């Protein structure tokens, strides 16, 4: 028997569900997407500059090093970041204490995690082609990445999406500028590229603190406890999901070497550009739902349908753009990135739906669903990725990633169908009225 819907449900086929609110949501999402797109463009240019300067092997080392640092920062900041958005959106009075708790978190667990990771890598000799001091440089950035992200979650929780977008864009732009300066001053080396990345993260934290417009209050044990309880329910999900996103590149580097990882990193970089569409919508949706957990699910369904359609169209456009514009700008060794990119795109489109549904459920106080979905995808990643890489190289990694993303999305879709009583078509098949603008309300007589 189907479980009865536990949340208020407006007919998902309705053509007038909060249409003015949806249009305002759409504008904020578009602004956020443009911020993400600019950030991705700067990050892409940074990596392309590195690729031109250092070749496939150096690019592979830099890519893995940055992914290691950003992955650690993401894992460390998962619980407080989720909680900052959730509690910060629900009660503005808690933001000062949340900011203090966040800074203490960056100064404590983040520093410890970075130091322990460096010690483990040095003890095991697992360096992914990097020198120990190069790993030390990039891992030193982890506390600053954590601090910057946590401050920015409080900014988005307060509804200041434009400030959030500017800060989100500043990191890659600063990394690109610093890399150019470092290459001119110290030469084109791996450590100079990683130093530029680390310096950019320090600058972003400083800018974020200035833009937050929040005076730090006394750290709150009550909020810390609540944050860890709420965030802990989503911690496993996000930790597993970042593994799903990143393990393929580490597997390629370990099995096929840094040069193969450098080629695959270009495919991953380009595929991730499409994630920004769903990421922008989910970023705005999460605090909106958290502020009113009884919000109609029909709003989320409409967002999901529009996002899936836009991501699908962007995926179709990306392939010829990559073949005719991007790859000719790189060295000939990167030509093999096209096939892995093509194989990643179906999974990226599927994952766009998962991001929207996950944001809605987290806003309703149920982040644990993402843990279950991510765990299902991780099983695919761990079992298939190494086998397919041995046989098919980077293309095998792309196939395994796509299958993992599809499984993750299927779980979320099943939860929505069962929990809210909607159909699969309601989740991803766009309708003409999804794009209709609202009419101006008539004046009373």
Image (cartoon, rainbow, N blue to C red):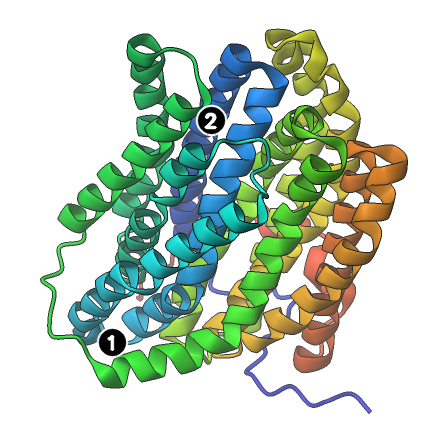
Residue 117: give x, y in percent of width and height: 46, 53
In the image, farthest residue toward the right: 391
In front of the other: 28 or 163: 163
Mark 1 nearby-residue class (10 Å; few <14, some 14–19, many ≥20)? few
The quadrant in which residue 288 appears is bottom left
The residue where tag 1 is placed is: 91
Mark 2 nearby-residue class (10 Å; few <14, some 14–19, many ≥20)? some
Residue 371: give x, y in percent of width and height: 61, 71
- For the residues carrying marks 1 and 2, which lies nearer the camera in this image? 2
Residue 146 vs 215, above or below: the answer is above
Q: Is residue 29 visible?
A: yes
Q: Are marks 1 and 2 in contact (CB under 8 Å)?
A: no
The quadrant in which residue 222 appears is bottom left
Mark 2 secondary-structure assignment = helix
In the image, farthest residue toward the front: 123
Horizontal relation, residue 437 to residue 212: left or right: right
In front of the other: 261 or 291: 261
Horizontal relation, residue 304 to residue 365: left or right: right
Q: Which mark is residue 41?
A: 2
Horizontal relation, residue 269 to residue 393: left or right: left
Horizontal relation, residue 165 to residue 189: left or right: left
Q: Is residue 280 visible?
A: no
> Residue sitting at 23 percent across and 37 percent down?
203
> Residue sitting at 35 percent across and 41 percent down?
168
């Amino acid at each position: 028997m189907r479980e009865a819907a536990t949340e208020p449900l407006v007919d998902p086929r309705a053509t007038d569900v909060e249409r003015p609110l949806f249009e305002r949501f759409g504008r904020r999402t578009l602004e956020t997407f443009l911020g993400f797109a600019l950030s991705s463009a700067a990050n892409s240019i940074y990596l392309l500059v590195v690729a031109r300067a250092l070749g496939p092997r150096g690019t592979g080392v830099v890519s893995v090093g940055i992914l290691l640092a950003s992955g650690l920062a993401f894992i460390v900041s998962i619980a407080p970041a989720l909680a900052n958005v959730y509690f910060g959106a629900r009660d503005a009075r808690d933001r000062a204490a949340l900011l203090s708790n966040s800074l203490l978190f960056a100064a404590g667990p983040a520093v410890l995690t970075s130091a322990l990771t460096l010690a483990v890598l040095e003890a095991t000799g697992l360096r992914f082609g990097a020198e120990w001091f190069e790993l030390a440089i990039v891992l030193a950035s982890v506390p600053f990445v954590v601090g910057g992200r946590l401050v920015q979650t409080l900014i988005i929780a307060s509804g200041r999406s434009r400030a959030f977008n500017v800060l989100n864009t500043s990191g890659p732009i600063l990394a690109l500028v610093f890399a150019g300066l470092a290459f001119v001053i110290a030469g084109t080396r791996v450590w100079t590229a990683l130093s530029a990345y680390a310096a950019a993260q320090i600058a972003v934290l400083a800018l974020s603190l200035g833009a937050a417009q929040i005076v730090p209050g006394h750290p709150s044990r009550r909020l810390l406890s609540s944050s860890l309880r709420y965030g802990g329910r989503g911690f496993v999900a996000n930790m597993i999901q970042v593994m799903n996103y990143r393990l393929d590149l580490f597997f390629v580097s370990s099995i096929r070497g840094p040069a193969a990882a450098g080629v695959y990193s270009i495919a991953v970089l380009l595929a991730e550009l499409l994630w920004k569409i769903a990421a922008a919508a989910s970023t705005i949706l999460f605090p909106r739902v958290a502020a009113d957990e009884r919000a109609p699910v029909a709003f989320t369904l409409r967002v999901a349908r529009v996002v899936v359609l836009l991501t699908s169209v962007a995926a179709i456009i990306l392939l010829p753009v990559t073949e005719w514009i991007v790859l000719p700008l790189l060295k000939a060794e990167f030509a093999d990135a096209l096939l892995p990119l093509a194989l990643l795109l179906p999974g990226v489109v599927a994952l766009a739906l998962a991001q929207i549904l996950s944001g809605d459920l987290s806003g309703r106080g149920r982040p644990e669903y993402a843990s279950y979905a991510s765990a299902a995808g991780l099983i695919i990643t761990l079992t298939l990725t190494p086998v397919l890489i041995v046989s098919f190289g980077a293309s095998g990694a792309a196939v395994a990633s796509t299958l993992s993303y599809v499984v993750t999305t299927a779980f979320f879709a099943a939860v929505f169908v069962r929990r809210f009583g909607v159909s699969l078509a309601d989740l991803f098949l766009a309708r003409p009225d999804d794009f209709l603008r609202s009419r101006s309300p008539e004046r009373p007589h």
